[in-house]
Image (cartoon, rainbow, N blue to C red):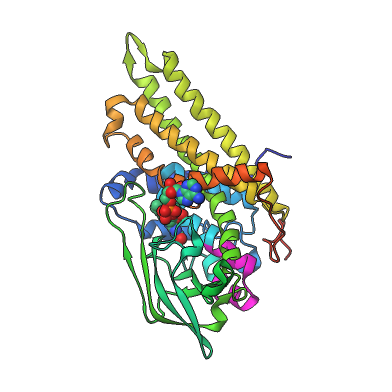
Amino acid sequence: MNFELSEEQQMLRKTVRDFVDHEIMPHIGEWDAKSHFDTDTLKKISKLGLMGVCIPSKYGGSGMDYNSLAIVCEELERGDTAFRTAVSVHTGLNSMTLLQWGNEDQKAKYLVPQAKGEKVGAFGLTEPGAGSDVASLQSTAKRDGDDYILNGQKTWISLCDTADHFLVFAYTDKEKSHHGISCFIVERTMQGFSSKATKGKLGIRAGNTGELFFDDVRVPKENLLGKEGDGFKIAMAALDNGRFTVAAGACGQIMACLEASVDYCHERKTFGKEIGKHQLVKQMIANMEAGLQMSRLLVWKAGELKNKGKRNTRETSLAKWQACDFANKAADDAVQIHGAYGYSNEYPVERYLRNSKAPVIYEGTREIHTIMQADYVLGYRKDKSLDQMLPEWPFED
Ligand SMILES: Cc1cc2nc3c(=O)[nH]c(=O)nc-3n(C[C@H](O)[C@H](O)[C@H](O)COP(=O)(O)OP(=O)(O)OC[C@H]3O[C@@H](n4cnc5c(N)ncnc54)[C@H](O)[C@@H]3O)c2cc1C
């Protein structure tokens, strides 16, 4: 165990922090108010090499370890959940899935431009009738010669209007229940594909979320990821990586809550003293600090298991569940500490509270993770070894 960041990781943290302070913080209030997803900022994040930080250099990434991805997510979410979500779906859910399951042709065609930040990837699993219950999905892919014909609809898909490539899950054999789901790499430019952003979201308003539609989309058989029927397994493995990034981001959300709250504690006086000197306010600050430190340890443990090429579904689920709950509570307390001022957009904490809710819902709701953890402890759930794992770090050349 080594809890010290390497020099490279410290430099990475500083680079992302400076970027967030200069390129996101000054504008985020306005973008959030206008529900504007700033694609120029996403391009700048790509140019900094942050879209492929833990992808091996032979596939166009920076070749850093998996905990370096956690550092990127933590620092980005300190600015806003929208940009961390972008990295979560692009790197965690899409690129790392291509790295784990793709063949060399698929990696050359899709992973390399994504890791370099030239193309954006996203992940289409959820449907109007299928969220937690993935096997209820209705999308279908029927084999026709050298292609599959894809039909269906996805909803709540992050980067729906922005991404170039999507991992899409559909039934190739409905009879086989979840063993009949397959995963396809779909390009935005394929005929019959369309997308539409969702309006009126509670939070992550500076992000892009919405629906995908597939109307007889012809997907070449070369774009099947893994084998027919591997889709459910691939989706669950992808979530091990997506959830890791969500948990790391939640640490950044807590950092932002702490920064704003500590400043306000020193600024605001009641009953003749700074509010930070009242014991009940101290308790909220202490809980935030405890949440941050505990969450970060859970994240780094999951990251270390990834570095060693070991399964980490249980550890990642625990980190995601706890970190998101801590962040949601930290944001609630941050508003409380600000009193009525926290209830207006004069201060950023109301945005933190709105943003902190989606991560408690996506990539496994609080309830799903609670059940998973209980089932591991009770012996009802055991992880089998997977036929494909993420490469261990340090990566081979
Ligand atoms: C901002 C945002 C971005 C998203 N981005 C993506 C994306 O990029 N790609 C993607 O595929 N999806 C995405 N999602 C969708 C997200 O993953 C789903 O919303 C999530 O999986 C929950 O599914 P659901 O909303 O259908 O809720 P449901 O599954 O219908 O759950 C409703 C409620 O019932 C509870 N519940 C369900 N089953 C059980 C059970 N067995 N035991 C106890 N309680 C249960 C849930 O915890 C929840 O409280 C996003 C969602 C949001 C809000």
Name which residue lies at 54% across and 54% down: 242
Q: Quadrant of residue 13?
A: top right
In the rendered view, tell whether residue 308 sits above or below residue 329.
Answer: below
Q: Relative to 358, is 95 on the left or the right?
A: right
Look at the image and tell me in which quarter the N terminus lies. Answer: top right
Name which residue lies at 33% across and 15% down: 269
Region of the chain picked out in magenta, as a range: 94-111
Residue 84 at x, y percent in the picture? 46, 51
Q: How many marks?
A: 0
Indicate whether residue 260 is drawn in magenta: no
In the rendered view, tell whether residue 200 sits above or below residue 216.
Answer: above
Name which residue lies at 63% across and 68% down: 101
| Direction front: furthest residue | 175
Name which residue lies at 66% across and 50% down: 381
Q: Relative to 134, is 66 on the left or the right?
A: right
Indicate whether residue 99 is drawn in magenta: yes
Q: Nearer the viewer, residue 396 or 341?
A: 341
Residue 306 visible in this rendered orientation of the protein: yes
Q: Nearer the viewer, residue 85 or 199?
A: 199
Q: Nearer the viewer, residue 162 or 20?
A: 162
Q: Relative to 130, is 28 on the left or the right?
A: left
Magenta region, main secondary structure: helix
Residue 359 visible in this rendered orientation of the protein: no
Residue 131 at x, y percent in the picture? 45, 57
Residue 224 at x, y percent in the picture? 56, 77
Residue 218 at x, y percent in the picture? 45, 83
| Direction top: furthest residue | 272
